[in-house]
Image (cartoon, rainbow, N blue to C red):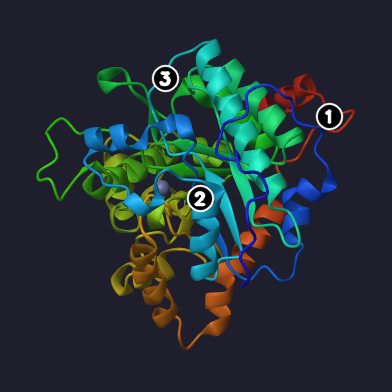
Amino acid sequence: MKLISDRKSNSNTPLTTKPSPKLSPSLSPAAILAHSSIKRIDVHHHYFPSDLKKSKANSKIGWKTPEGNLPWSPSTSLAAMDAMSIDLSILSFPPIPSGSIGKIDRASARSRNEYAAQICRDHLFPVPRFGFFATLPFLDDVEGCLEEIRYTFDQLGAFGVSIASCYGEGKSAKYVGHETYLPIWAELNRRKAVVFLHGAQVPSSTPYPHEFLGIPVTESPNETLKAAAHLVVTQNRRIYPNVKIILAHLGGTTPFLACRVAVLSNHMGCALTPEEILEDFKTFYYETALSAYETNLLAIDSFVEHDHVLFGTDFPAVSRDMSNWYTNNLEMHYANDKIKLQRIMRDNAVKLFTETTNNPLSEEDTPEKEQKGDHDNY
Ligand SMILES: [Zn+2]
């Protein structure tokens, strides 16, 4: 595949000033996915704006971003995508659970979204190479989040939103099913939006056990389970059924521990039966980044409908070789079922993103009218 070079030499500089033009049809997820030459879609692909200070963040969490991927620019990803036969990557900002309510976080989210949308616009032709999940301000800033959803969906053509498993520090942290965030879920539900849910890189109450076992290795996958389980046992998964949630890394430990939540949470007072809890866990979508291994793939095959499995790499947080180790496993696992493999690599993502269009508002579809409707259903 021919490498499409960056057209803007400064495209790794966040944009902060110029508002984006109104969303053009060529930028909508449906229009991007209509390109039949797109055969492989990576739904777990990060971008690292220059203000992220990735090396400093790594030292706190016990991770080494491969040196060749820093400083990151779209060219870094394009070269890797071409080497890995990835036609389209859906960019997301790394999951950062800290922040505060206010103008600074709102401006950061806006800047990141403008930057991501600009990368998409810069690489639309001849075949689009990028889509993006919107970054929200600190989630406790509900009004700020709602405004950013409106802007990124209606004007920038976001494929959905990317959120972390929890927000806040230490004991004050809240998981994503917390009642504070329900207006955000209601809005995402109304829009039939896609949410990419990624375990936060937060420490447990003990230090990570070894320098080879930093937070991304041992903690983040459990954070994904905790957030998914929180949405299930609070019943928010079934109160907001139109939201399509992708769990990063095959849900972390979710396929193995969902049955544990089912019986034990019911025992602890959850009103849902074990069967209902499992049913709700099966509504999530699961992407394969850093998790495609025979055991895990057998588990996910037996746990969810096959159209709920998507392809991901987690590049550039990891190297091409690391991503390829998992992709090779995936291809070997489905070597005798090319149709299933093609669905994971492309078709399931196309179906998900085109069925759930992150609907913009129509003229008569006012938020007040819709919110009233939503509450009627609670
Ligand atoms: Zn990631």
Q: Is residue 330 left or right of residue 6?
A: left
Q: Amino acid at mark 2?
A: Ile
Earlier residue among tags 3 and 1: 3
Look at mark 1 in the image and give the residue it sits on: 365
Separation of marks 1 and 2 at Cα, in angstroms: 27 Å
Separation of marks 2 and 3 at Cα, in angstroms: 23 Å
Residue 14, image x, y percentages? 57, 31
Residue occupying the far bottom of the picture: 336
* Depth check, front residue: 284 or 344: 344
Q: Residue at x 36, y 50 (%)?
A: 274
Q: Circle 3 sits in a helix, a strand or a loop, which is it?
A: loop
Q: Residue at x 71, y 28 (%)?
A: 151
Look at mark 2 in the image and give the residue it sits on: 246
Q: Is residue 314 left or right of residue 39?
A: left
The N terminus - image quarter? bottom right
Tell me the quarter of the picture where residue 372 sits: top right
Q: Circle 2 sits in a helix, a strand or a loop, which is it?
A: strand
Tell me the quarter of the picture where residue 21 sits: top right
Q: How crowded is the residue under tag 2: few (<14 C-alpha within 10 Å), some, or many (20+)?
A: many
Earlier residue among tags 2 and 3: 3
Q: Residue at x 86, y 33 (%)?
A: 362
Give the total number of marks visible in the rendering.
3
Q: Amino acid at mark 3?
A: Gly
Look at mark 3 in the image and give the residue it sits on: 99
* Depth check, front residue: 202 or 192: 202
Residue 123, image x, y percentages? 68, 52
